[in-house]
Amino acid sequence: MYENSFIGHNVEIAVSLLKKGEAVAIPTETVYGLAANALNAKAVAKIFHIKQRPTFDPLIIHLASFDKVYDYVEEVPEPFILLAEKFTPGPITFLLRKKDTIPDLVTAGSPFVAVRIPAHPVTHQLLTKLDFPLAAPSANPFGYISPTTAQHVADQLGNKVYYILDGGACDVGLESTIVGMNDQCNIEVLRKGGLSVEKISAVVGDVIIRDISTSNPEAPGMLSSHYAPSVPIVLGDLAQLTNGANSDRTGILTFRNFIPNISTKHQIVLSPSGNYMDAARNLFAGMRYLDTCPIDVIYAELLPETDLGVAINDRLRRAAFK
Ligand code: TXA
Ligand code: MG
């Protein structure tokens, strides 16, 4: 525990703490991560401790560039090379057969390690100054909404992390899309995220969307209740849900338009112009904001099931799960 955390822009401080085996919060284009030296099991253990994350939930490792991946994995299947050429650095994570250099704690004992090349310039610079990859889950306490600003991290992990490297608000706002390959060499999407399935399919053809069961989650970040704020979220048709609702005690999360007869202070419009990227960028901050309002319930509508609407809806359904 620290008195409090520091939010700053100093990459050298982050470098020095990470080299000493400490955990540091870092910006990425998707969400903020809580990073530590992926090759140092003791440093990685700090991440699990700070997040109160169960050790059966494996971590993604982050590299400066895709060519470095061969130091840590046995092989990269051809379709993943195509995806990496097209989409890295960016919001895509690959599950690849790991080499022994990656501690079992990172992968929760799995022979596969999740690898990502983040596109954020500050974290790119940080990674180029390190001779080890960074293991980094989203920098939220286990089970809560992922942070998309340095302040979100401070609000939740404050005295548990000494330094938060500030890189501004995250550009994408949703966690990366995770892809793996099954025994039949089909590509599977294990988590819908900041890179749409349509874009992936345009490069490698049809993919399998794996709905991982909550009782035996293979990617435990997929636990249904994962993104839950503390005010209950109810999904549905907003006109119906708000019929007769208490105008001051009701929160609204809508895609494009304010809902009449509900206090606008308690409404988040994700994108008035109907832009999916804007909606994704605003989603988690919007959920956090509503969670701080003096309201009893948040009514939210699903977006059209296309583009990033698919991943946004996935997070909304998990947040609404009870
Ligand atoms: O955008 C992102 O991916 C962010 C930023 C910080 O990079 N990271 C992130 O990490 O969302 P995290 O730990 O919150 O979510 C990673 C997900 C978890 O659901 C985890 O179970 C899954 O990836 N995962 C990691 N390694 C895995 C593995 N070896 N096999 C299966 N699933 C894995
Ligand atoms: Mg997470």
Image (cartoon, grey):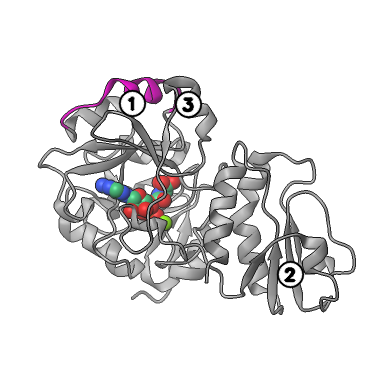
Q: Are marks 1 and 2 in contact (CB under 8 Å)?
A: no
Q: Which is nearer the eye, 166 or 170?
A: 170
Q: Look at label 1 and name its amino acid.
A: Phe
- Identify residue for label 1: 80
Q: Which is nearer the eye, 273 or 242?
A: 242
Ligand 2's quadrant: bottom left
Q: Look at label 3 and name its amino acid.
A: Ser
User: Residue at 67% across / 68% down in the picture?
Assistant: 290
- Identify residue for label 3: 201
Q: Which is nearer the eye, 74 or 232?
A: 232
- Residue 207 placed where, x, y %? 42, 31
Q: Which is nearer the eye, 181 or 248?
A: 181
Secondary structure under the numbered disc 1 in the rendered image: helix
Task: Spot the residue most to the front.
Answer: 184
Secondary structure under the numbered disc 3 in the rendered image: helix
Give the image quarter of residue 118: top left
Task: Spot the residue most to the left.
Answer: 100
Left or right of 160: which side holds 293?
Answer: right
User: Around disc 1, counting alpha carbons within 10 Å, would you say few (fewer than 14), some (14 to 19), or many (20 or more)?
Assistant: many
User: Residue at 48% across / 69% down in the picture?
Assistant: 156
Residues shaded magenta: 74-87
Q: Are marks 3 and 2 in contact (CB under 8 Å)?
A: no
User: Residue at 81% across / 65% down in the picture?
Assistant: 240
In the image, which disc is placed on residue 251? Answer: 2
User: Around disc 3, counting alpha carbons within 10 Å, would you say few (fewer than 14), some (14 to 19), or many (20 or more)?
Assistant: some
Q: Is residue 240 visible?
A: yes
